[in-house]
Amino acid sequence: MPENHVVTISRFLIEQERKIAETTTGTFTSLLSNIALAAKVISYQVNRAGLAEILGETEQENFHGERIQKLDLFADDVMQKALDHTGLITCMASEENEFFLPVPENFPSGDYVVIYDPLDGSSNIDVNVSIGTIFSIHSKISDSDRGELKDCLQAGKHQVAAGYVLYGSSTMLVYTTGAGVHGFTLDPSIGEFVLSHKNMRFPDPSRRVYSINEAHYPGWETGQQLLVDYLKNEGDFSSRYIGSLVADFHRTLLQGGIFMYPAGQGAPEGKLRLLYECAPIAMLAEQAGGRASTGARDVLEIIPHSLHQRIPLYVGNREFVDLAEDFLAEEDSAT
């Protein structure tokens, strides 16, 4: 791309809507543009959080029993306010709220459902580690003007778009509408997301990297322990782990490998949330030529039974996810 040929996310979305039937009305493009606007606001506050005195925890706990970070509340509020008045959505669901959020009665309602984690990796905020926002978009399936729970509880394979925003040394927005994965970097000089990574794909699996928190090794099932033992001893893998899903997945997408967050002691069903984290990441992975699995089945095939359902996650190059499933299946067959 010539140096003076800048493609903003707005221009790219307009060009894409001519190619994808789902976006021909322009409303879908407007929805993604509003998410991009929210990302700019969150990025600005993340970068100046220490100066603005919004680092650290509040005195509140959420319904998960976790102490709420100040930036979590800020990011959640920004996402809600960026979307609730647009007339594009019927309801939202946020990792920070126990119940789904119908569009307020004083605003018009639309045909889309947005599910999001406003600030993934928020436990890393105070130590300046990369964090992110994850989002998932579905079409409404109920007849309700303000949405119903079933609008949110759809299998990941029915997503019409998914993406994340990474707040790191630069701010990047990565998304898919089912026609490839594209990345945009926020250019602070013009205040716009510009196309920097078109048609992102997992690189050749000769790049052998695994990402997992090995501190949990004693609490893993035998198959998981054997898998990690194989990767580092016989598979000639190197280890990289950040501790923020968005950052770990982003690195895996750019460099190849596998990210794992298995079930284990204290989290028998897994820790990551299906709707807010795993399903959107799974859509991105498959569109980039990879896979996402629970270790036993494709993440995108799971029909959720609750808003905050948790699952194990294995995501990355298809060959490595298949390998993980093989190890875990051997343990199941042995028992």
Image (cartoon, rainbow, N blue to C red):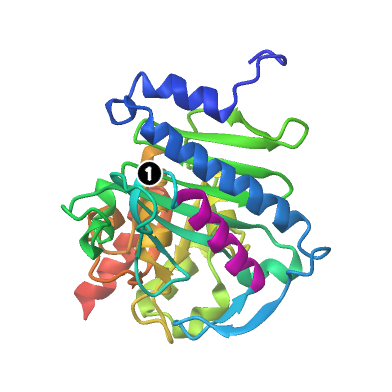
Across and down, in percent, residue 321 comes to 37, 54
> Residue 305, located in which quarter of the rendered image?
bottom left
Along the line of sight, the residue nearer the viewer: 85 or 157? 85
Asked if residue 321 lies left or right of residue 228, the reply is left
On-image quarter of the N terminus:
top right
The x, y position of residue 256, in whole percent, is 52, 45
Q: Where is residue 299 shown, x and y percent of the image? A: 30, 57
Structural crowding at the residue carrying mark 1, measured as other residues with C-alpha within 10 Å and reported as few (<14), some (14–19) or many (≥20)? some
Q: Disc 1 on helix, strand or loop?
A: loop
Q: Amino acid at mark 1?
A: Gly
Q: Main secondary structure of the magenta part?
A: helix
Q: Residue 216's spot in the image, x, y percent? A: 52, 80
User: Is 293 located above or below residue 124 in the figure?
Assistant: above
Q: Is residue 204 visible?
A: no
**Dot 1 corresponds to which residue?**
87
- The image shows residue 248, relative to residue 21, as above or below, that is below
**Residue 322 among magenta residues:** no
Q: Is residue 291 above or below residue 212?
A: above
In front: 170, or 70?
70
Task: Find the residue positioned furthest to the front.
Answer: 106
Q: Is residue 77 magenta?
A: yes
Q: Which residues are magenta?
A: 70-83
* Quadrant of the snapshot with the C terminus: bottom left
Q: Which residue occupies 20% across, 73% down?
A: 333
Instruction: Give the camera-side residue of 70 and 267.
Output: 70
**Is residue 25 in sight in this rendering?**
yes
Q: State the residue lying farthest toward the right.
A: 51
Give the answer, above or below, for where 182 lies relative to 108.
above
Q: Residue drawn at (49%, 85%), measured in percent from left and top?
A: 218
Residue 264, quarter of the rendered image: bottom left
Hey, which residue is sitting farthest left in the picture?
143
